[in-house]
Amino acid sequence: MNYKKPLNTSKRVLMGPGPSEVHPRVLKAMATPLIGHLDPEFVETMDDIKYMVQQTLQTENYLTFVVSAPGSAGMETCLVNLLEPGDEAVICIHGVFGGRMADIAERCGAKVTKVEAPWGEAIDPQQVKAALEKVDNPKMVAIVHAETSTGVLQPLEQISKMTHDAGALFVVDAVTSYCGTDLRVDDWGIDAIYSGTQKCLSAPPGLSPVSFSAAAIEALENRKTKVQSWFLDLSLVKNYWAGAKRAYHHTAPVSAMFALREAYQLVLEEGLENRFVRHRKNHELLKTELEALGFEFLVKEGFRLPMLNAVKVPEGMDEAVVRSQLLKEYNIEVGGGLGKFAGKLWRIGLMGESSSANHVNMLVSALRGIL
Amino acid sequence: MNYKKPLNTSKRVLMGPGPSEVHPRVLKAMATPLIGHLDPEFVETMDDIKYMVQQTLQTENYLTFVVSAPGSAGMETCLVNLLEPGDEAVICIHGVFGGRMADIAERCGAKVTKVEAPWGEAIDPQQVKAALEKVDNPKMVAIVHAETSTGVLQPLEQISKMTHDAGALFVVDAVTSYCGTDLRVDDWGIDAIYSGTQKCLSAPPGLSPVSFSAAAIEALENRKTKVQSWFLDLSLVKNYWAGAKRAYHHTAPVSAMFALREAYQLVLEEGLENRFVRHRKNHELLKTELEALGFEFLVKEGFRLPMLNAVKVPEGMDEAVVRSQLLKEYNIEVGGGLGKFAGKLWRIGLMGESSSANHVNMLVSALRGIL
């Protein structure tokens, strides 16, 4: 057994679908000795973080906070708080994560209408419009902004307008897009949004920034039934994050929050627009280099994610073998395909600290060495 | 706004109900650069942790793992996986956390029979027996081993036997007792148990070790309905923690797991029995000193938690003022009362790294200075 030995991990170059690499300042902040989760100094830390979540989501939403669990729990937070048994939900599915939303919505007892696009394509707003016309009283339309399983960037504004015209709430998964490409919660009329920390924000995995609009809060307040999850029930959580006197709900992950605060500072020091440009530029560089090596992008131009490059494995290449060689010989992690794309696709992340020309150059040179 | 400034927390002495202090080795391990959540080296880390959870829970349960969220989510994990709508659950309540279990069980659609004892007392096994006689087909009996809101250590063995005689599963909250006092999952017939990391284990808050017996797994496999939480659904989570080929479920909190591995090593290096003795000894020291200062214990001898000392605030002392002085002048955190004990009780933690003669001496000397 190795459990008695000191932790002895390799120095990895993280270019998969997350976690991305983390700045040394973030690691250092995380190693700060703990303080209590109700300490006035921790409440200040929460306030700082809340303000920086608002800045980066481009929202003034009062109910903006961080779920003490990973992005999937953020997804569940948005759905369990807004859906009651019998509610009608239109869920857009163009990859693994849309499918996960539908699964959770069904577990809430909602009647789910699925709007599906082939994996690798975006949802066409006209499909959503058609679905909304068939649903009597839609409570929400939910969609993934950056589908991590396919590399598709989903345009949101037109679908948001249709959703509101139908009197429904617009719910967005921004796990992979957040802090890597433009995302405007208020301007785009997003009512509930969740993300993760381990992608373009470049903090360790384990937390999920979430924001609810006034309309979403109203829906929460008008529920006839209790939220099925106690841990994710925002009518309780909000008293810890936003109450005048902070009421104990659960013990917040203090160290992870220290890390998150530092990661947000790095984002704001760089500036959102600069960060988006950087992600775009490194994506362009990778694209040129990979195409020269015979890789093809799955997604058509104009709909590609800058931070998550889904490329088809070239004919005749055993992807698992090459991926394992990259890890063993070069310490470089890239992601394989998820679900129906397993074995057929690579997902190359250029997220946050892992979005640099050096990362692109390391990967491309290693691939040249192997192929 | 202070959000632009570097994190600048005080060096606190943590003697509240958790988080406890963390060994420098744990902070250092947590600051290790990240690797991926599906990296073979991370899978090894998970295996090491799983083995150490088994050792410390004194169990051979195969389904032993760590929920990627705090203790409250561990509580929810045990209840949502074992309860289906209409199931009958006997929930013992002698403080805040028993009440929380009843709340969650009701959110699962279970019919809840409450067995209540006055706060500060243990549940009498005869009460459980009486309740079980009135319930047709009990699915579980759930109880808190160490009630953090009252400082009561609940004897478990007799209630476990009654529970099994009635054909039900025995579910235990061990958030505060785990790694600080004896706890034998297999010997005591515990079917589902959850804990937290920020108490006597002395890792940062944010994770919850959980273990399910064969009987609990059978109940999970025989469910007629889906688990209402996707994030906590063990039929999915188990493929990430225990499957032959580890299937992606969610992105695990890599850094927190590095910290947890180190915290477990420290526990096993000390030895469980030595650790229990240390917690008992420091509790005795604190008891002698506090009684000399006029504090009285809430709980009668024989039922007191060694790691969480619930003491009545002496007549005429403004507890909030003194508690705030302790924090401001001495950087010492102690906990106030929860729920109906707010303003009347102090909860003084001597947990994990915070259980030392030095901690007792610092607190007692500071109190002498203030009073």
Image: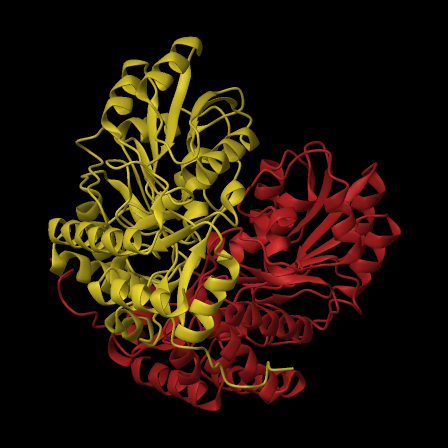
Chain colours: A red, B yellow
Residue name at image x 23 percent, y 27 percent? B157
Q: Quadrant location of residue B94?
A: top left
Residue B29 or residue A40, whichever sits in front? A40
Regarding residue B186, the answer to whether it shows in the image is yes
On the image, the x and y values in percent for residue A224 come to: 73, 34
Question: Count of labels shown?
Answer: 0
Image quadrant in which you'd find residue B364:
bottom left
Residue occupying image coordinates x 47% and y 63%: B322
* Quarter of the C terminus of chain A within the rendering: bottom left
Residue A126 against residue B142 in the figure, above or below: below
Q: Position of residue B170 (x, y in %)?
A: 32, 27
- A284 sits to left or right of B141: right
**Does residue B357 appear left or right of residue B116 in this picture?**
left
Task: Please state, as top left, top right, bottom left or bottom right, where the N terminus of chain A lies in the image.
Answer: bottom left
Extreme residue in the right direction: A165
Residue B126 locus on image (x, y percent):
33, 16
Residue A7 image position (x, y, % from top left): 21, 69
Name the residue rendered at 31%, 75% in the picture.
B32
Between A73 and A331, the residue placed more toward the observer is: A73
The front one of A329 and B145 is: B145
Question: Would residue A319 be seen by someone viewing this image from the given angle?
Answer: no
Seen from the viewer's position, the closer of residues B246 and B153 is: B153
| Lateral position of residue B54 relative to residue A326, left or right | left
